[in-house]
Image (spheres, rainbow, N blue to C red):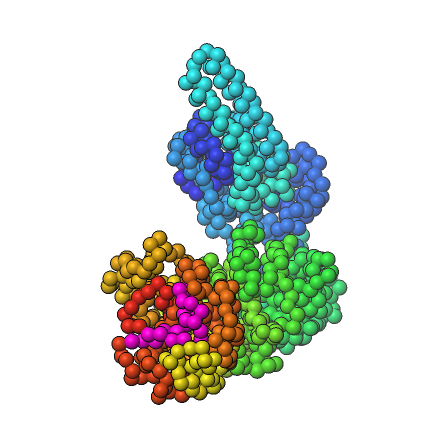
Amino acid sequence: MQQLIKKGASAALDSPVIAALVQTMGLEPALLILKRHFTFTAYEIATAYQKGYSYALPAITAGLAAPEQKLAFLQKLTRSKLDREFSAKIESHYLQPFAAQQGIVGESELKSLRLQLIELIKVLSKQPLKLEAENRPFTESELAELVHEQGSLAITDLVLEQIAPVDDTLAEFLRYEELLGNAILFFLRELIRQDPRTKTTLETLQREGLWADVRDIKTAQQQLATMFQQQLGDQNARAMQALQAGDSSAANQITSHLGSLKQSLDALPEQLQAAQTAWQSSQQPLIAFSQRFENWANLLDSKVDQVLAAMGTLHGTIIRIDENVAILLKEFRQFMQQGGLSKQLKAGDEFTHHSSASLKLIQTAVAKLKRLPSNKPGYDQLVIMAGTVLSSTGETAEAEKLFQQALTMTNNRAETALAHFNLFQIRLWNKDYSQAFEHLDTASKLDELRYALHDVNKYPMKRLLGAGGMGCVFLCEDQWGENPVVVKCFWEGNKGPRDEVFREAMLMRRIAGEYVPKPLDCDFTQSGRPYFVTEYIEGALDGEAWLAQQGKLDVSTGIGVGLQIAQGLQVAHHQGIYHLDLKPANLLFKATKTGLMVKIIDFGLARVATSLRAEAVSRRSRSDLTQFGQSIVAGTYDYAPPEQLGDNQYGEPSAKSDLYAFGATLYRLMTGESPRHLNPRRLKDAPADLFELLCDCKEENPKHRPETAEVIARLTDLLVSKKPKKSGDIFRDRLKDGSEGPEMVVIPAGRFQMGDITGNGYDREKPVHEVSVESFAMGRYPVTVGEFKQFVESTRYKTEAETGDGAYVWNKEKQEVEKPKDANWHNPYFSQTDNHPVVCVSWNDAVAYTKWLNEQTGQPYRLPTEAEWEYAARAGTKTDYWWGNEIDKSQANYGMNLKQTSPVGDYKANPFGLYDTVGNVWEWCTDNWHENYEGAPTDGSVWKGGEESLRVLRGGSWVGNPTNVRSAYRVRYNPVIRVDYYGFRVAARIL
């Protein structure tokens, strides 16, 4: 089915409403009704298009004509009284905004444009709209397509394709805000709706709950609810008749239908809301147009021939301009047309390309301008046009003088506002934000509709904070005048529903509040410019301002900042949101008590507006650009990856594009230099791994760049390794999958008396001797089931209990120890969680775990030496237990009081911050067994020699008595033995 035919029929039927309501009622009933009543052929729809086109052109022309002519034209044809407000709507909503877009603001130029458009439309009206279509009813599949037709009803381009070549200016005007397409669809819809077949179709659909006039959703709901209530009453009566007649089958069938009707009634509010939303989403431009021009329907009272004939009475007016001025105006219009310029300066105008020949012609024209008397008619327009053209060549100082001249010589409010706005752009390009702000403030007060970049009544401006490739940023007051807010205004906004345009930005509010300034509002100005409002963070500086004031980041701070940025990227990337303009200027820094806070700005705005990046890509030289232009070019070439610079071999921009910019950004922040080429000497104080990470991020091929999770893991490792560890610090090393290893505590260096200090022990604990221990790290808890499970799942390791004959466990029922073959670390014959200490592991199993931890973290993990274990368990005390010489069961898990292990950390930590050093599980140490301490090392190192077949265990367990859980108590067992109260804790050297 032709696209035009489909969209025309869809507009007449309000098909988005039908599509939403058939979700509940079903498509088949709707198709039956359409097939029975909506018997239009494609040929008839095409004919309605041709008539709609024939009515639309005169109506638009009437709106362009001089006021007295347009009123006479419309009143004659519609036989009705129309006020001036109606007749001026084409002027205010289309002609004037279009003229402003083209840089036409003077009254004489506007009149000239009006005359030009009227004459061009008259010519166009003589060219019929030719459409080919079959003269047969729609098939069922085509009707289904009509019901589910999606997308906007933009048809202007489709119509223009069907007629002879149209003048460029006229085509642009007819495309403006979809003027021609909406006008044609307006008349087409009215024509088809007047047909009895359409009325019958819609009435029948409405009776079945398959269509509603959702313009008034409250009335629509009442009408449909009444209809459903009537059907419920009828069905109830039928059900009673069936029951009285003894027809249970019919009664059951009717009862089932009653249930469906009740469900439909309950779902009615939600379904109508969905229908209204769908209708507004796809037909919003046509809806707004129809509300604005509803009286145009009266034109249908006249025949097409009469309407077209009446067009001949319409014409425009024009004033005479001095010949020399006219010649220069023509020349400057040509310059503007060639460069895609308008009288109203745009932020990207300085990226305009001019050949050496055109530059010479422009200089010649400017010289002619300076020789002309300034009192000539049209001279004020000429000055503004010359300023616009000169500014695009880089001659901003000369352009500024011309705009200032325009201010002094014109009394025209529109031209004054335009000159102020252009001076705003010039000052902004030179980063003179204070003066730029003053000019914009004046321009927006003179003509808010045209020049206000956001709703200045809701958010009054206080000052201009900065500008970039997407737009400029203002400090404003909130609508209550109570709090400062930041308003981001965009140079070029994307069109569409608010929720669609700002979807990613508002999603960031929900998912990444920690990493972005809090979004507060988003909307469009009356002229369609988008703007975005966020919280204002007092005292924050963007990354470039921070470098200028505070200098480059030190290594630890830089790594920490990089980690915050990467974490923010990861949150967004998980939702498919890419920044695509990451650089220091799009970061906010604020010093806090805990370090440097980072917020990423402009996140989620890539789809709100276009950037000047494309224009910047075309300008490799920065020498002739303003400060603004140079910053855009630098931001493009220094931070954008190849795929954002037009290198198609790498595909579309993606999350990996942000990683490229991340590497460049972090290098810039930590060196203060351009990130175009990374130099390792500039990061000589940083770990070599950091430079390697930045190089990986800046790989030309996106496939070779790391994932965001890997960047976070590597930065975390660097942050931990770079940060000096001091006594009492708690840390966890990162594993390769991004998870964390066991929680470790830094044990301070010191001396202690090792052995039976109190005299309550055994010979194996003697002689007491002094040992010096260097600082080291020790597991805060015994290794847990969950931590051991990570190791097993990563390596598929089988413990010796699993590969051998099981483990020794306590049989609670028999009250004795036994050795079942299926007893092992995940089946110790008592219940346990991931937070219980792992048991039934041999010394060999424990060593295997530490080796895996080494490989995962790159850190020197091992089992503690016996001296380290006792030193850490005593924690500076000289008593049997770290709290004293007495013990009860509220202080530790021992003496069979729980009949099994307890979760780690259930009892108090010792002064060094270690848990479960008294009882719970015996803990394997590195050392071989020696019968006493004769000849023991005094430096805390591992004691070699002794009995190779035995290893030391310390700490006691849930089985042991008070003597066995003393800090000095020691036992030994074969390294292959597995028991349900044997576990271990890890240690590591501090690097």
The residue under the point 52% across, 17% down is 237
Count every numbered label the image shows and give the total: 0
Image quarter for residue 59? top right
In front here: 252 or 280? 252
In the rendered view, tell whether residue 682 sits above or below residue 569: below
Q: Nearer the viewer, residue 241 or 66?
A: 241
Q: Which quadrant: the N terminus?
A: top left
Q: Is residue 554 above or below residue 182?
A: below
State the residue at coordinates (70%, 39%): 82
Quarter in which the C terminus is drawn? bottom left
Task: Single out the residue that lies furthest toward the top.
Answer: 245
Residue 240 seen in render: yes
Instruction: State left or right for residue 352 relative to residue 523.
Output: left
Q: Residue 969 lies in magenta, yes or no?
A: yes
- Name above or below for residue 968 compared with residue 79: below
Q: Which residues are magenta?
A: 950-972
- In the depicted view, which residue is nearer to us: 307 or 427? 427
Could you tell me residue 446's position as x and y percent? Answer: 72, 61
* Residue at left offset 33%, top offset 81%: 931
User: For this view, does 93 lie left or right of residue 839?
Assistant: right
Percent coordinates x, y for residue 27 in the rendering? 44, 33
Extreme-left residue of the structure: 804
The picture places residue 683, in percent across and down from the top left corner, at 46, 84
**Residue at point 45%, 77% (across, down):** 760
Residue 405 within the segment the image draws in magenta: no
